Amino acid sequence: MSSLTFHWFLPTNGGDGRHIVGGGHGVSAGPSGRPADVPYLGQVARAAEQMGFVGALTPTGAWCEDAWLTTAMLSQVSERLKFLVAFRPGVVSPYLAAQMAGTFQNLSGGRLLLNVVTGGESAEQRMFGDFLDKDGRYARCDEFLSIVRGLWGGETVDFVGEHLQVEAARLAQIPDPVPDVYFGGSSPAAGRVAARNADVYLTWGEPPAAVAEKIAWIRRLAEEEGRTVRFGIRMHVINRDSSAEAWAEADRLLAHIDPATIKQVQDGLKRSESVGQQRMLALNKGSKDDLVIHPNVWAGVGLVRGGAGTAFVGSHEEVADRIQEYADLGIDEFVLSAYPHLEGAYQFGEGVLPILAQRGVWQHPAPPVVRSATPFQYAGRESAAPDAGRDPARGAAS
């Protein structure tokens, strides 16, 4: 097994806190407390890159800060972390998107990844001026990515499609390297677009058998297109020193969710056009009961949060075991998050990643440089540190 890749999440959807913060149709289960501003998000980004996450997903939609602008700002307060920028093809022209990606990639030093989101809700799309139906959005996305890939390849693109048209389009800002395209979707139309265009197919966290079916489905479609696709999964994580502590935290999060909030969110999510969202709802059933859908996999987040609604829950060792179980199915990349995201990055990075490193399935993308101790200058003489190992009350080393 090659080294697994881990990404974190930037909570631009209403801030961060010690409760589940909703996204999309979701509603926060408590006050966020931490605003989605550059100082705080910068802390999250720096924690993620220090711990060994390769990138951080930044969401898109009417309910969060703009992903392009946010990550461009955060690239200036971080060093290595890549940004998995979610964007919607229906709200920007393919030439402009290709140009933006080239600019971002070249000015950030190659720190861009792209998460293409076709848009699962027509009502929200219409807010952006997009009035295509769901099948039309997927067809347009296919045309969009065909144009963009041609431009990134240095071609002069002439394209006339059902939804998009460009003439003699040639890009001056070719991204170097070309960013990987991440794509998710559970409908037949989504599968075809992913097979033709995605570098990484992303699924939300379902039980292993369901994930295995999705992998086989996309792999077969990609083979028909003469392509290969990598696979990733988007989940939350609650890992602690012991299993009991982790489940106590899951119970605490659940205790802050009142039945009225669950009903409000679930009623909204039931109207979603997203097949993936409906699969998430089927896992939690709108109830606080029976939320463990597989050992150490919990569906409680999806009660009040749209999109990714499941979490790994358990001791560091148990979570590492579950990650390896999904990796054995063919999952190469894990896009994770926690509440709060700052502490969660450290808990996962210090608790789970060292176990995976010991097992030989993960390595830090930029291991820290080991430096020898620097002598401390003190009162005109060198020592390891002032009064090192000395009991000040006794005036002698102890």
Image: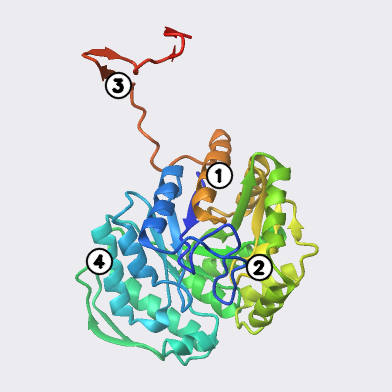
Work out whether 365 lies above or below 11: above
At label 4, counting other C-alpha atoms closer than 10 Å, the crowd grade (few under 14, some 14-19, many 20 or more) is some
Q: For the residues labelled 1 and 3, say whether their Cβ atoms are less than 8 Å apart.
A: no
Element at label 2: helix
Q: For the residues labelled 4 and 3, say whether their Cβ atoms are less than 8 Å apart.
A: no
Tell me the amino acid under the disc marked 1.
Gln
Disc 1 from disc 3: Cα separation: 29 Å
Colouring? rainbow
Quadrant the N terminus occupies: top right
Q: For the residues labelled 2 and 1, say whether their Cβ atoms are less than 8 Å apart.
A: no
Work out whether 221 lies above or below 369: below
The residue pinned by badge 2 equals 302
Residue 80 percent across, percent down from the top left: 34, 49
Element at label 1: helix
Tell me the amino acid under the disc marked 2.
Gly
Residue 262 in the figure: left or right of residue 72: right
Tell me the amino acid under the disc marked 4.
Thr
The residue pinned by badge 1 equals 347
